[in-house]
Image (spheres, rainbow, N blue to C red):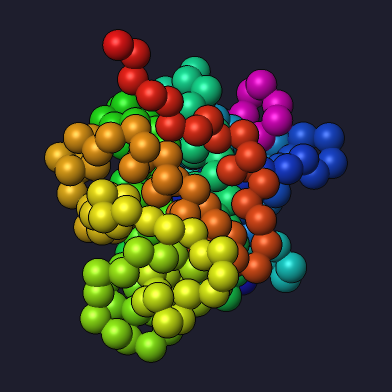
Amino acid sequence: MPTYRDEVVVLRTHKLGEADRIVTMLSRRHGKLRAVAKGVRRTSSRFGSRVEPFMVADVLLYQGKSLDIIQQAESLGSYGADIAVHYDRYTAANAMVEAADRLNEAETTPQQYLLLVGGLRALARGEHVARSILDSYLLRAMALSGWAPGLEECARCGAPGPHDSFVAQLGGMVCSACAPTGAARVDRGTVGLLTSLMAGDWDAVDAAGHASTAAASGLIAAYTQWHLERGIRSLAHVAAPQEPRR
């Protein structure tokens, strides 16, 4: 049976037998992969630490009948340790890999892989507030999957904006004629922040006020979970944006 090599980011693992693990990975060229890492739970394992969640590795895999087998793993990005020691980074990273797992059940692109790696790297380095990194990742990952929220024109009828209602079920911002009763009202500051998160404009994101940041996070969580059709369990543990101390 053939072997193949790819770059991967580890999404999750679970135990198999006494010493093995099944590793779920998002790869750069082969989509989402599930493979057995034999003997990695033994202390003598040569590469056990390289196939833990949030790690980025170059792996050599043997194509098996049901599950592939990881034969080698070389570290490309050791982000797990720096993420795990900070609660906000750890919970945000869990939500990111869970979303990546759901979004890439059918197919993936190199852009999805690179986006996730970039998000985990930013979390590990503490480049921005963890919740903002997560929110930006979710919006951009949804866009790559064809579910970019409408933020200027009405997502339902296409009427030009600005609009002040957001409805996840309708695809984003909607005009007053399309907005159902009880639709969430959104101010322009929050809409601007959503746009900045989508574009990766970190100067604007970092300068945003607490109210806009909290509102944007709630809208993104609702939008993502609606379109994935299942809740992201890890989001329940992600801390809400905190108001800065005076």
Q: How many marks?
A: 0
Q: Is residue 188 visible?
A: yes
Q: Quadrant of residue 44?
A: top right
Q: Residue 13 location in percent, x, y?
A: 66, 43
Q: Quadrant of residue 172?
A: bottom left
Residue at 49% of width from left, 68% of height from top?
167
- Front-most of residues 30 and 125: 125
- Front-most of residues 148 and 92: 148
Figure check: 66 above or below 216: below
Figure check: 163 above or below 46: below
Residue at 15% of width from left, 40% of height from top?
203
Name the side, left or right, on which 193 lies relative to 1: left
Q: Is residue 6 visible?
A: no
Q: Is residue 157 magenta?
A: no
Residue at 30% of width from left, 11% of height from top?
246
Q: Quadrant of the N terminus?
A: bottom right
Q: Residue 195 location in percent, x, y?
A: 26, 58
Q: Which residues are magenta?
A: 40-46
Name the side, left or right, on which 198 lies relative to 216: left
Farthest residue to the top: give it.
Answer: 246
- Front-most of residues 160 and 138: 160
Residue at 49% of width from left, 39% of height from top?
93
